[in-house]
Image (spheres, coloured by chain):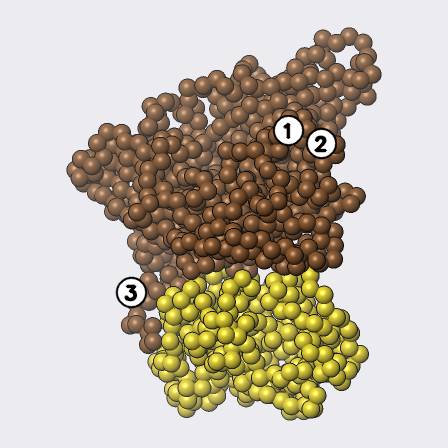
Chain colours: A yellow, B brown
Amino acid sequence: MRPFGYLRAGSVDEAVRAAAGQPGALFLAGGTNLVDLMKLGVETPRTLIDIGRLPLDRIEELPGGGLRVGALVRNADLAAAPAVRDRYPVLSQALLAGASGQLRNAATTGGNLLQRTRCTYFQDTSKPCNKREPGTGCPAVEGHHRELAVLGHSAHCVATQPSDFAVALAALDATVHLHGPEGERTVPAADFHRLPGDTPERDTEIRLGELLTAVDLPPPAPGARSRYRKARDRASYAFALASVAAVLAVRDGTVAHAALAFGGLAHRPWRARAAEDVLRGAPATEDTFARAADAELAAARPLRDNGFKVPLARALAVGVLTDLAAPG
Amino acid sequence: MTDEPFPAGPPPQPLGTPLVRREGRAKVTGTARYANDRTPPGCAYAWPVPATIVRGRITCVDTRDALALPGVLAVLSHENAPRLAPTDDPTLAVLQEDRVPHRGWYVALAVADTLEAARDAAEAVHIGYATDGHDVLLTPDHPGCYVPEKVYGGPGARERGDFDTAFAAAATTVDATYTMPSLHNHPMEPHAATARWDDGHLTVHDSSQGATKVCEELAALFKLGTDQVTVVSEHVGGGFGSKGTPRPHVVLAALAARYTGRPVKLAVPRRHMPAVVGHRTPTVQRVRLGAGPDGTITALAHETLSHTSTVTEFVEQAAIPARMMYTSPHSRTVHRVTALDVPTPSWMRAPGMCPGMYALESAVDELAVALGADPVELRVRNDPATEPDSGRPFSSRHLAECLRRGADRFGWLPRDPRPAVRRRGDLLLGTGVAAATYPFSVDASEAEAHAAPDGGYRVRINATDIGTGARTVLGQIAAAALGVPGDRIALEIGSSDLPPAVLAGGSIGTASWGWAVHKACTALRDRLRDHRGPLPADGLTVTADTHRETAESSGYSRHAFGAVFAEVQADTRTGEVRVRRLLGQYAAGRILNPLTARSQFTGGLIMGLGMALTEGSSLDPAFGDFTARDLASYHVPVNADAPVVEAYWLDEEDPHLNPMGSKGIGEIGIVGTAAAIANALWHATGHRFRDLPLTPDKVLTALTAATAPAAPGA
């Protein structure tokens, strides 16, 4: 075990101050991913700042019908919260599609968003990886990449973002609250995760020393229904080969509101703006849904062994949108 | 063998009773001690260093940084490790030479006061290498392929009749090639050992399927008598074949303990396991079947290809079941193997039978489709009266009954044989069947039975309980033979200090140990019957061995049989295949404990489900190691994958086995299961998938190619 410092923060400000004063510090919450990565030698923090007892474990009503979810709300609790189940089924479904019951009991809202890719090269310190060690190369491009990206990847990194939860947040137009040395700021959830470009070591827009404190869910779109669907190698406890989060409102046979995001396809939840442009105002038919999916997936650049993800994502999107548009 | 091996007594009879496990309470309350649960005073910890090259030589071992860390006792490598005697199993010749035969081969071992320090030290060891080119990919036309003279179950190649002529003349033929990737055993408890030396005596607590063999091997490697070595395997958290022979970890622990003079504990990290504990080799299997218009098979060829390592030859004997399953006057069964720069493959649950029957039973299903025959009836039609390859009579063969009874239970009929016609929303449904078989075998063992003056009994034998319930079943056999209640009998198993016995593997444990226990207990019962007056203070003790009985050739072909039925659904949107129902019907002699037996059967069925749908591991061509090395990426089935799994058995009486009349049941459950599921997937979708596992990428690609225009970007 590599020695590391440990301190428990008594407040958000104290946590942020501590992080600012400690190069190589990482925040520890549920630890379901970070501790694994420390065991593998992938993460080597000099200090762990335990934020587990900060008062960030509440779900609060926001004026206008939205919700504020504290960063330490456990995945299991969030998925089961009546307000979430009633207003944001897609979010509850996405959470329950991830990990296992035991992990969901420990994993937190913030930690779920900040979990790291499961690319096998990233997890193996005996191999090169640009995300882990910038400049060493990306063996996944030519190597084992069946589970990896078909959209938005670069020559430097073809990893995928593993969170199901993040995909639902992207479709819900959620907002991520960050608290840093220079104060608070918010970032749209759909823009929180980055594309790899030539800096794949950065997963998200979070800045050094910033603490993710909450996620805001806006009021649900009027008349909208939502759903999450995930395809995977086994029935439970497997990461998405592809997934889709969709929010759809249909009025008089026409799409009044549509938000769509894909998971398992890219370095970030893939908000499908091109698809939404096709959907908005169009007849809510399977043909429209197929055209919408095609419009989005035209940008796909599959690798040698993951071309199946494109028809898979297309079928998931068409299926979920068709289900959501069906009366009843 | 007498006609009535067990005395009649008042009901309930111990044999056939669903007794709970003797050690169940200890296990669920956490008091059962496994190999690494003991910490002798002064215990040190070892952490191995795996090679990060695929093939080559170690040029230097720089241990300065490692040894400078606090608490580090030693770093062993080929430069300083104690010398071992030559061994028949070169995978055990650890830290003896500079050669690296595959990535993950252990090249050094760090030993320290704590586990953490050992791990740190292992990472601080700097190994220099000279690398050679490598080759880890098994290809059908690999230039290194050869036919081994022998495989475990018989000759490497076998010809009977004239296959080529008969196949060319057959009215209906199938010629298909089936492939499957490497599979990993991944028992819940990783391989682990705690070793210590006391005045020249080596004591090891090892997670092993057979402490006798480990004891003998360690004695040979360290040039000791077997009386100078004690190996204890009291509780074992699964093995699935990967603990059937000694593994490098136990040698490393003993080496480190000798070198440091401290007890040493070593557990193989989960991510190291694929490279050092064996795996099921990938296979390429071509099966050709020719049949007459009535469905009688006239020509059968099963040719298999697998890989082995450059360390030692291990051949997956996948063509063996084709020598005894179906009537065919003309038969060719051939194994080919090629040595690659890969980890050494080894035993995995139902070696040979499991992959072999996947291919054979898939081909039989294809033949049924080609003939327009019902797959159950086609198998019954080709059920031989005597073993095709040897002509020997079967001691018992109730395959046809298993097929019929299983079909009834499953609701096989009425069945529309047409594929791809059962649609429910996005799902296509289908059913499939396959036969299962596993050879009966028995090996010599010794047992001791003791009667104490207080009315208690004790049975001692170095049997191993790898989670199957061996203690419990042996207690039942002893109770039945002695004619006393089981709770008066104490069982001592799992130590090489006990009378020696065969390993828990090859589905031979209960038959072999049970025979010795029966013999000892029967002899003790006779002694007690003849004894007059109170027992002496140290009781009466009888030992027995079965060397003579088990050496006798039986003259019969002896196998367990079964039939597996599966209902699957394929999601036409996602390509996800799920099993809706899985049912196994077996004929495996007398079932001694229905509770533990059902667990064995259903466990095998679920492991076969994993092989069919979720499990697979490939070698990385560039880095030479397995790509799936943890339980997050190597997908064993979870509960949600196995909603309804049922196992049934016939009351089969077979007098040609052992006093209990039992056949082995540990492995047959995995045999045939993947074929039943793949056959059901054909029935569901109309696509014949011949490459396992049946994951969404393959299934969706086939379904989309058939039903929809190509998607953009694909």
Marker count (numbered): 3
- Percent across and percent down for residue B282 are 41, 48
Q: Which amino acid does label 3 sit on?
A: Ala
Instruction: Give the Cα separation between the discs numbered 2 and 3.
Output: 70 Å
Say which residue appears at 68% left-offset and 21% top-offset: B448
Disc 3: which residue: B706
Tags 1 and 2 in contact by the CB under 8 Å rule?
yes
Subunit under mark 1: B
Disc 2: which residue: B200
The reply to whether label 3 and label 1 mark residues of one chain is yes
Disc 1: which residue: B224
Say which residue appears at 59% left-offset and 72% top-offset: A115
Instruction: Of the two numbered discs 3 and 1 on the same chain, state the one appearing first in sequence.
Output: 1
Q: In the displayed structure, would residue A46 be above or below residue B240?
A: below
Residue A31 disc label: none
The reply to whether label 1 and label 2 mark residues of one chain is yes
Q: Is residue B275 visible?
A: no
Name the quadrant of the C terminus of chain B. Answer: bottom left
